[in-house]
C-alpha cells in the first residue's frame, strides 16, 4: 500500500480482512495528524468501517438531525430534518491506525517507481529499499506518484475556487452560537459562494466528549496573480494544492475575516473570526479512464479528484478498497482476474462522482443558485442522500 492516509489505511484493513499480508508505506516521516478538518460519514462508509473493519465510529462521531439555511441576523431561512454524521480527519485516522499493526506501517517511505514482473511487482523507495509484492495499491492522493507513473498525461483541472477551512472549539464560542450549530449542518449563502458549518469531535484535544465547530467556505479565485499570491505560504513558496494551518499569510486571513463579517450571518462570522489559523484547499477535478495497470492499481484521490460538495470522497476510497477486497476473495487471490472484475465499476463510480460534485459546485460558484435544502445538493456518494 503506497500512502498511509485514510484511503491507504482503509485499503490495508480491507485487504487484510480477506487474508492478504499488507504493508503500508507512507512518505511523511512522522505520524500524520492533519489540520483538524471535518469529514462527513455517509451511511455506506459507516457500514463498511463498522461491519468490515470492526471500528466503532460512534466513539469518534458527532450527529446532527437537520440542515439549516442561516440568513442575515442569524435568522433561520429554511430547515429540513435530515440526519448527518461527522468526524474529524484526525479522529478517523487515529481509529483506523489503532486497527492496523504498527510494525507494518512504515513512515518516511516514499515510493518512486515500480517494476512489473511476470508474477508480481516491486515497489522502489527513495531510501533505496525495494518491496516485493503480488499487488501494489497506490492510495497516494491528489499528487499521486502512481498516477504520474501510469498516466503521466492526466492533469488536474482547477475548479476556479478554493475552500477556506478551520475549526473553533465549543468553549471559545458564545453559548448561543454553539446552540445554533450543535445539531445541524448550517449553510450560509452569499453571492456566488456558500459555507457549510457543522460540529465535529474537537481536533485540538484527546477528550472524546469535546466538540468543535468546523467550516468550509467556498470562494471564487480566478487562476491569476491573485491565486498565486493567496496560495503562497509564509516562507514565500507557492503551493497550488493546499496551505496548512499556520501557512496562510496574515493579510489574507485578515481579509477573509473581514469578508465574513460583511457577507455572512453573525454566528458564521464569529466562527471564522475566532479561527486563529484557517487553512486553504484549492479545488480540482481529475478523472482517469483506468485504475488498474498490470499488478498495480490506484484508489481514492490518486484515481479521481473531486470537489468536496457531496461529502463522500473518503467513502469513495472506502468503496474502492472493500470492493477490491471482495474481488480478491471471489477470485481466490488471482490478482489479474480480481483487478479485471474490480476496475470497470470503480471507474464508473469515480467518473459519476467527479461529475456530480462538479455540477454541485457550478450551481453555487458559477450560476449563483445554491439552495441549501434543495434535494440535489444533499450529500452522498451515488446521489443525493445515497
Ligand atoms: C476542502 C475539502 C473538504 C473535504 N471534505 C470531505 C468530506 O467532508 N468528506 C469526505 O469523505 N472527504 C472529504 N474530502 C476528501 C478527503 O479528504 C479525501 O478524498 C480522502 O481523505 C481520501 O484521500 P486519500 O487517502 O486518497 O489521499 P490523501 O489523504 O491525500 O493521502 C495520500 C497519502 O499518500 C502519501 N503519499 C503521497 N505520495 C506518496 C509516495 N510517493 N509514497 C508514499 N506515500 C505517499 C501522502 O503523504 C498522504 O499521506 C475533502 C477534501 C477537500 C479538499
Image (cartoon, rainbow, N blue to C red):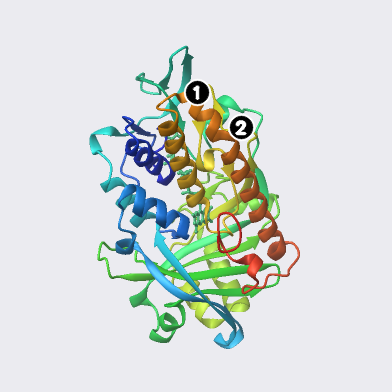
- Which residue does the numbered mark 2 point to in the structure image? 290
Please name the residue shown 70% across and 72% down the image.
191
Please name the residue shown 61% across and 32% down the image.
290
Q: Is residue 53 above or below residue 82?
A: above
Determine if residue 184 is in view.
Answer: yes
Label 2: which secondary element? loop
Please name the residue shown 41% across and 57% down the image.
46
| Residue count near mark 2 (Cα–Cα under 10 Å), binned few <14, some 14–19, many ≥20 | some
Q: Is residue 215 above or below residue 350?
A: below
Residue 265 falls in image quadrant: bottom right
Residue 257 falls in image quadrant: bottom right
Nearer-the-camera pick, 12 or 344: 344
| Residue 355 horizontal/vertical position (percent) | 67, 50
Compare marks 2 and 1 and give the one earlier in the sequence. Answer: 2
Q: Is residue 153 above or below residue 244?
A: above
The total number of labels drawn is 2
| Residue 7 horizontal/vertical position (percent) | 44, 43
Please name the residue shown 34% across and 59% down the image.
57
- Which residue does the numbered mark 1 point to in the structure image? 336
Q: Residue furthest right?
A: 367
360 with respect to 294 (left or right): right
140 with respect to 20 (left or right): right
Label 1: which secondary element? helix
Amino acid at each position: 500500500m503506497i500512502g498511509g492516509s485514510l484511503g491507504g489505511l482503509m485499503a490495508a484493513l480491507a485487504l487484510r480482512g480477506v487474508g492478504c499480508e499488507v504493508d503500508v508505506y507512507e512518505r511523511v516521516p512522522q505520524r500524520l495528524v492533519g489540520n483538524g478538518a471535518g469529514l462527513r460519514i455517509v451511511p455506506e462508509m459507516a457500514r463498511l468501517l463498522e461491519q468490515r473493519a470492526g471500528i466503532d465510529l460512534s466513539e469518534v462521531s458527532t450527529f446532527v438531525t437537520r440542515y439549516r439555511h442561516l440568513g442575515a441576523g442569524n435568522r433561520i431561512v429554511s430547515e429540513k430534518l435530515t440526519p448527518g454524521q461527522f468526524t474529524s480527519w484526525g479522529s478517523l485516522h487515529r481509529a483506523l491506525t489503532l486497527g492496523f499493526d504498527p510494525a507494518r506501517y512504515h513512515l518516511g517511505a516514499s515510493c518512486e517507481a515500480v517494476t512489473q514482473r511476470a508474477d508480481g511487482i516491486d515497489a522502489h523507495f527513495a531510501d533505496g529499499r525495494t518491496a516485493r509484492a503480488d499487488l501494489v495499491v497506490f492510495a497516494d492522493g491528489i499528487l499521486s506518484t502512481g498516477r504520474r507513473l501510469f498516466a503521466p498525461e492526466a492533469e488536474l483541472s482547477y475548479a476556479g475556487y478554493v475552500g477556506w477551512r478551520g475549526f473553533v472549539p465549543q468553549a471559545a464560542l458564545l453559548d448561543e452560537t454553539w446552540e445554533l450549530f450543535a445539531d445541524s449542518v448550517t449553510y450560509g449563502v452569499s453571492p456566488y459562494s456558500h459555507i457549510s458549518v457543522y460540529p465535529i469531535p474537537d481536533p485540538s484535544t484527546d477528550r472524546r466528549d469535546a466538540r468543535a465547530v468546523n467550516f468550509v467556505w467556498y470562494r471564487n479565485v480566478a487562476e491569476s496573480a491573485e491565486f498565486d499570491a493567496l496560495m503562497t505560504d509564509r516562507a514565500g513558496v507557492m503551493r497550488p494544492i493546499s496551505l496548512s494551518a499556520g501557512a496562510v499569510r496574515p493579510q489574507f486571513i485578515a481579509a477573509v475575516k473581514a469578508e465574513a463579517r460583511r457577507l455572512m450571518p453573525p454566528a458564521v462570522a464569529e466562527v471564522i473570526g475566532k479561527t486563529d489559523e484557517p487553512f486553504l484547499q484549492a479545488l480540482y477535478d481529475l478523472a482517469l479512464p483506468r485504475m488498474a495497470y498490470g499488478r498495480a492499481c490506484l484508489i481514492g484521490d490518486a484515481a479521481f479528484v473531486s470537489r468536496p460538495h457531496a461529502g463522500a470522497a473518503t467513502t469513495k476510497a472506502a468503496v474502492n478498497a472493500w470492493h477490491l477486497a471482495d474481488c480478491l476473495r471471489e477470485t481466490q487471490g488471482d490478482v489479474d482476474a480480481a483487478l479485471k472484475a474490480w476496475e470497470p465499476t470503480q471507474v464508473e463510480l469515480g467518473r459519476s462522482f467527479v461529475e456530480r460534485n462538479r455540477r454541485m459546485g457550478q450551481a453555487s460558484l458559477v450560476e449563483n443558485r445554491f439552495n441549501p435544502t434543495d434535494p440535489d445538493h444533499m450529500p452522498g456518494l451515488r446521489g443525493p442522500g445515497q
